[in-house]
Image (tube, rainbow, N blue to C red):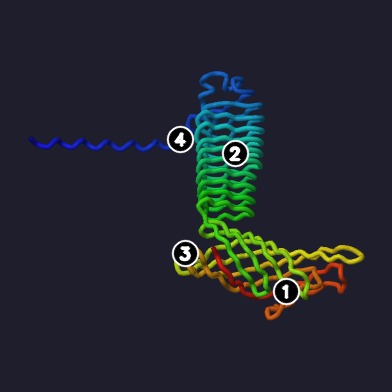
Amino acid sequence: APAPAPAPAPAPAPAPAPFSCGLGTAVLGADFVPGVGSSTTVKGRSAVRLASFNLVGGMSRGLAGVEVGGAFNVHTEFMCGAQLAGAVNVVLGPVRGAQLAGGVNIGADVRGAQVSGGVNVARDVRGTQLTGGFNFARDVLGVQLAPLNLARDVAGVQVGGLNIGRRADVQIGVVNVADEVDAPIGLLNFVARGRTHFDLFVNESGLSQLAVVHGSRRVHNIYGIGVQPGWSGDKPRLAGSLGIGVRGIDSSSFTLDVDAIFTSLTRFRATAEKTTEFFTFQNELRALFGVPLSSHVTLVFGPAVRVLLTSDPDTSPPPPFGGVKLHDERPNTTYAHGTATWLTAGAVVGLRF
């Protein structure tokens, strides 16, 4: 018997119809509140407005122009153009243009900008969300700027105090949280699928530190604590460091990190007259090479350039890396303040685990 004929392939799904703003049917409209004004009738509520003026608030099917509302504006299907509300803009469908509100903007699929004093909410954003409070979106192609930003995938930048995302290109904030991010730039970064290691190293002046290095594949933060031997025979000093670095080369044979690190050292001197606090700040730029010794241990080493700023009369870079003194305005007393600055070159060597 002949083989049965194969079933015909299913017809491809039709392409979605292009979104239309309905400009050709737009009319003028005005409301006192929804249901009082142009929206009193079913026809009025289903209209597309070219210009809309709402004393307290208004409602229609869509906007293809400009709208101003004293308190709120509501559209059940779409908005094209610009909305300005004293408190809230709500669009239950696509937004093409700008939503400006004193309190809250809500839109489904935003192509343009949401700017508010409190909260912006959207499903997908291609453009910008800017607020003084909280931005929320599923996927963002563009920028989120707020004290708190939350999104699933960000092809662009989140800028704020706290940035949270599943996947992001760039996060700039005080605290950044993501499963994956190319460039987290902040005081505290938490990257679930990032890299974390510990560095134990010493530099030419004897500063020994243990540092936690955490971040993405390319950008990392450095948090260190250590001990600096005393200058001029005084007691050792505790050192705390904070830095950011970029991984320039990441191969199986070696790595190269370029790090910028700020280190603070504090010393107190007690005399019969008073107790004086002296500060020493060290700003460092270093190139750190890493050569694997085993699967869990890496040798790290490299040159460094530093700017040492201090008010401590007993602090100066030790030889043989004494550096170049840029200025010294410290008075010759045990407790008066002044500052001195050196530009020095040195080296770092240690182990990474």
Cα–Cα span, label 2 and label 1: 49 Å
Comparing labels 3 and 2, the label whose residue is closer to the camera: 3
Residue 176 percent coordinates (x, y):
59, 50
How far across and down, in percent of the image, does residue 37 sit? 60, 21
**Of residues 134 and 314, which is closer to you in this image?**
314
**x 58%, y 64%: residue:** 199
Q: Which residue is the extreme one toward the top?
A: 41
- 215 lies above or below 69: below
Residue under label 2, please give it.
120
* SS category of the residue bearing label 4: loop
Q: Is residue 255 above or below residue 81?
A: below
Mark 1 or 4: in front is 1
Residue 147 placement, left or right of 77: right
Amino acid type for the residue under numbered disc 3: Ser
Give the residue furthest to the left.
1
Q: Earlier in the sequence, mark 3 or mark 4?
A: 4
Q: Residue at x 52, y 45 (%)?
A: 140
Q: Around disc 3, counting alpha carbons within 10 Å, would you say few (fewer than 14), some (14 to 19), or many (20 or more)?
A: few
The dot on residue 295 is 3
Check if mark 1's residue and mark 4's residue have beta carbons within 8 Å: no
Give the labeled residue for mark 4: 20
Classify 10 Å Cα crowding around label 2: few (below 14), some (14-19), many (20 and above). Answer: many
- Mark 4, residues whose alpha carbon is within 10 Å: few (<14), some, or many (≥20)? few
Q: Residue type at mark 4: give it.
A: Ser
**Residue 342 disc label:** 1
Identify the amino acid type marked 2. Asn
C-alpha span from label 2 to label 4: 24 Å
Tell me which label, 1 or 4, sits earlier in the chain.
Answer: 4
**Of callouts 3 and 1, which one flags the residue occurring earlier in the amino acid sequence?**
3
Q: Work out how far the residue at label 3 is from the one at label 1, CA to CA, in angstroms.
A: 39 Å
Give the structural element (helix, strand or loop) at label 3: loop
